[in-house]
Image: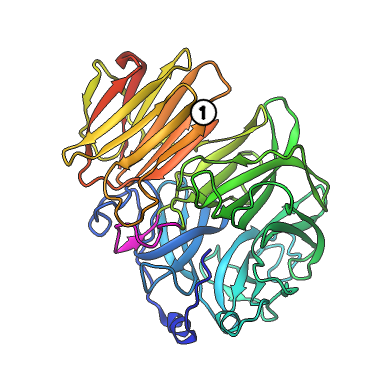
Amino acid sequence: MNTKLITLLAFIGMLSSCQFKSRDVGDSDGGFDEKYRPQYHFTPPGQWMNDPNGMVYYEGEYHLFYQHYPDSNVWGPMHWGHAVSTNMINWEHLPIALYPDSLGYIFSGSAVIDWKNSSGLGSEENPPMVAIFTYHDPIGEKKGNIDFQTQGIAFSLDKGRTWTKYENNPVLSNPGIRDFRDPKVSWFEEFNKWIMILAVKDHVEIYSSDDLIKWQKESEFGQNIGAHGGVWECPDLFQLTDNKGVKRWVMLVSINPGGPQGGSATQYFIGGFNGKSFTPEDSLTRWIDYGADNYAGVTWSNVPENDGRRLFLGWMSNWQYSQVVPTYKWRSAMTLPRELTLKNGRLYSYPVLEFNAKIEVGENLTQDKYVLEDITFGLSMDVETVQPFELTFNSSSDDVLKVGFNGEQFYLDRTNAGIDSFHPDFAAIHFAPKTMSDRLKVELFVDTSSIEIFINGGEIVITDLIFPISPYNELTLSGVKPQDTKYFRIKL
């Protein structure tokens, strides 16, 4: 989350911002057909968007709130935009949920269902949906104070349609730290309390509460472990059962800059949690995605036990160039929603099953060159051995996008993939480590301005933005037999 100075007058002006019409982003009707507008990824109706926030499931709806500035296509005074979905693919846009106020902008955070009404903000018959977020005070920041970020809450009693801010905000004051933000709150039944994990400069801090209002600090983690090329942001903490039936705890922490491609990225740790402190199993630095454009991702809360999945969504951009990419009516998209699983000590990330409904039955290729007739499509290849290969996508404008494996690393080469003059770091080759398996399955999904690659069911993932001058219309295969490759159309 960028903390550039914005004047007080600018953010007061946000309080009367316009609302947006509802729309299913799976449709392709007028208004969502701008050049580079994704067709099966979430985008805001207009203007600026960054981190996903407040992701919670309630009564058949997945709620997605997000960092939003409704008056410009670059970052500004932050609001919480809002959308809901029954399948995480098709979204209905709702009015802005949270506006800046006298305590500051509304930075990133989370949302929970307070089933037992521990907060007293609702009732057990109508439990409140509670949002926990960071207040960012631009006046205090401009004065040179370091305690300008605090944590506040708001609640809704009508399925997130209207919100009331808690009258005694903030609920967690700043202890004198410049970066003190992005609360991810969860109820853990085994500890019988609410747990908040908070990003604090170069580490995270863990707090606990009985009522979402009074918070007690429990521990710190991260000062001497993991990647430290930038500020830590947007943490998450949850439990998964691995492929051997062992329950383990996973912590996500985004960092900007300092990712594997130089800019924004999300690392993760595997370990144990006792209700107070997190203990890592090792000191390895692991990345949830090796592309440049998956940042600030967190998981949905309150997913029903009979579902049991850990569901993730990330911001599909990078702070290196997010404010200058060649889109104008809107800026930024979210990744495909993904299920997270643990296998053999790695966190796997793979598109949710609901996305299958968007994939039309594929056809095996019959030759090394194939004409692409769609601007949105999927491709899979499945071979018995891990071997060098290259997939080359060309457009009529001489744009060239390459995806392959060189015998040591997987790579995505966007050095000549389309428009890239807006930032010197955009045109690059992004590398990822080899798979642990002897078999190789590669699946990739291309939208109008993005590509997401999933290797061996999400063991390795590469997510990147692309801006071809004209759509890719030809695929050339090298090192792989056409019959081992299948082309999919994506339903819009």
Query: Label 1: how many residues lie within 10 Å, few (<14), some (14-19) or many (20+)?
Result: some
Res. 353 in view? no
Q: Residue furthest toward the left?
A: 396
Q: Nearer the viewer, residue 446 or 420?
A: 420
Whole-percent x and y of residue 446? 34, 38
> Is 448 on the left-hand or right-hand side of 433?
left
Whole-percent x and y of residue 163? 56, 72
Q: How many marks do you count on the picture?
A: 1
**Which stretch did the figure color magenta?**
320-332
The verdict on residue 324 being magenta is yes
Above or below for 69 versus 267: below
| Residue positioned 39% across, 62% down in the render | 323
Question: On the image, which quarter does residue 329 sit in?
Answer: bottom left
Above or below for 442 versus 128: above
Q: Residue type at mark 1?
A: Gly
- Predominant SS of the magenta segment: loop
* Residue for badge 1: 457
> Is 121 on the left-hand or right-hand side of 81?
right
| Residue positioned 25% across, 60% down in the render | 31
The verdict on residue 393 being magenta is no
